Amino acid sequence: MGASIGLALGGYTPVSIFPRWNFLCLATNSLVNHLDKLARISDGQYEPKVIIRTSIGSQRPLHPQDQHIDDFTDAYRSMCKNIDIVRLEEPGEILPAYRLAYGRRDGKSTILVEYGDYHSEK
């Protein structure tokens, strides 16, 4: 997450991939205390835009156990005031959501949440 923030400060739009929410938890400090707050604490001087892809871990055909299947969308929405968090319910939402996240000009980062089970089911 720190490298993505650095790239974004350098004018790039990085796409950070955390295969499941449970892995994104490890980057929570940088996400909540840096990426989400940087525009506000710099009085708008820095508005890094990062696209973060994560998913709710798949449970079928093999259940990976509880440490890999959580959905923390609502918890992160409550912690992040300047990051758009989008749960993608249908396959047709994925490409438009990525295009919107990449093309946005409002200085906001985006977390796109996919469902791991939908990759083989929809």
Image: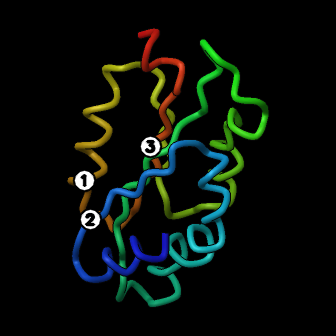
How far apart marks 2 and 1 lie (CA) works out to 7 Å
Element type where label 1 sits in the image: helix
Pointer 3 and pointer 1: residues touching (CB < 8 Å)? no
Instruction: Check disc 1 and report the residue beneath it.
Output: 102
> Which residue is nearer to you in this view: 56 or 32?
56
Residue 98 screen position, x and y as percent: 29, 42
How far apart marks 2 and 3 lie (CA) works out to 14 Å
The C terminus: image quadrant:
top left
Residue 100 screen position, x and y as percent: 26, 45
| Extreme-top residue of the structure | 121
Q: Earlier in the sequence, mark 3 or mark 1?
A: 1
Q: Nearer the viewer, mark 2 or mark 1?
A: 2
For disc 3, the neighbor class at 10 Å (few under 14, some 14 to 19, many from 20) is: many
Instruction: Check disc 3 and report the residue beneath it.
Output: 112
Residue 58 screen position, x and y as percent: 59, 25
Residue found at x 32% / y 38%: 97
Residue found at x 53% / y 70%: 36
